Amino acid sequence: MQNLFNGIYKEKTVLVTGHTGFKGSWLVYWLNKMGANVIGYSLAAPTEPNHISLLNLNITSIIGDIRDLDKLNEVFTAYKPDVVFHLAAQPLVRLSYENPIETYETNVIGTLKVFEACRANNVKAIVNITSDKAYENREWIWGYRENDPMGGYDPYSSSKGCADLLANSYRSSYFNPDEYKKSHNTLLASCRAGNVIGGGDWAKDRLMTDIMLSVSQGKKVRIRNPYATRPWQHVLEPLSGYLMIGQKLLEEKVEFGEAWNFGPSDEGSICVEEVVNHVKKHWDKIDYEINRDPNGLHEANLLKLDCSKAHIRLKWKDVWESETTFEKTVLWYKNFYENNIFNTTDNLSQYIDDAKAKKIYWAI
């Protein structure tokens, strides 16, 4: 596994913010398997159970707030990371309505302070993770491209749009590609992904988590917005994209210090009710009821990404079709709740084997 991504991560010091969250825990697991010296910086795991505790990894795990610049600088100075993957965020739309101040403070000012710590400590590469919700969503039937305008209806989406604009500003002001190796030594890229699913996510108000928690309690899952359409992908898909971008930046390829979309092919864009019917195939205890709230909070109905840039310039492709993604996700939870085991290792190994079989660039 250490030869993946041209072996770039072996013995590199990699700092991941938000490593106790869903995507962060999968990322540090993969980096650890590739021989990286992993430093995690995050608040304590947000749920119980949580994936990071189950993994029990041999990494340096630091509990800290990205809004604490003094502590960030202490950590960066002590460990001198080669590359930073910035995933720490308040990630939930509905919670952002309840607590907009914390959402903006974390997602915008927190990102600002991570960038400042990177700048003060001469970090070589920054992979900034935002969201497909950063785009100004016009409910188009086609996908958003990297040069479409940022926006956001709800506080979460808006905060992610702001974080992306902040990254653009830092790239122009402090990490300008034209000044690389002259006035600075840092390359900065931003990555945007659609809805990700997979085992180990227990955050509330996420469809797959709601389904799995409900079935584990013998309850029907309540579906708020059955016709909302999203691009569903396994968590390993965007992570492979983030790792590809990190590789290019560490290889000092200036042209990759830009914004990138990572999402599934069109067959992965499926409405919520269809998703529930797909996952029912793999766990017969799953049942649901539609429970629309006419006074509910605004949620987008249609949101897709155009990933042509990543396909053409990075040679990045998704590995698993939607049916495989749903199967792997459901069976992870089914095994966890019924057999007290979890399939993270098997999922990653199978994903890499399938990528090699498809001759996907990062795996060969």
Image: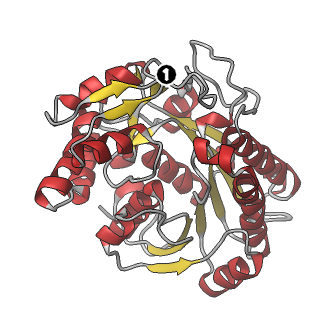
Q: Is residue 101 left or right of residue 214?
A: right
Q: Horizontal and vertical percent for residue 313?
A: 55, 34
x 45%, y 42%: residue: 206
Q: Which residue is mark 1?
A: 228
Q: Is residue 36 above or below residue 46?
A: below
- Color style of the picture: secondary structure
Secondary element type, mark 1: loop
Instruction: Kindly indicate the quadrant of the structure image that contains residue 294.
Output: top right
* Quadrant of the frame with the N terminus: bottom left
Q: Which residue corresponds to the image point at 23% horizontal and 59% vertical from the top-left?
A: 345
- Is 62 above or below relative to 289? below
Q: Where does residue 237 sit, x and y in percent of width and height?
A: 40, 42
Side (left or right) of 314 relative to 156: left
| Nearer-the-camera pick, 37 or 165 | 165
x and y percentages locating residue 82 in the rendered image: 59, 71
How many labels were placed on the picture?
Answer: 1
Q: Residue at position x 68%, y 37% from top?
A: 134
- Specify whether residue 358 is in view: no
Of residues 148 and 250, which is closer to you in this image?
148
Q: Which residue is rendered at x = 68% and y = 24% of the image?
A: 137
* x and y percentages locating residue 295 in the rendered image: 61, 26
- At label 1, which amino acid type do we have? Ala
Label 1 Cα neighbours within 10 Å, binned few <14 / some 14-19 / many ≥20: some
In the figure, is residue 177 to the left or right of 99? right
Whether residue 50 appears in this view of the structure is yes
Instruction: Residue at the far top: name it.
Output: 141
For the residue pair 197 and 362, the one nearer the viewer reads as: 197
Quadrant in the picture for residue 32? bottom left
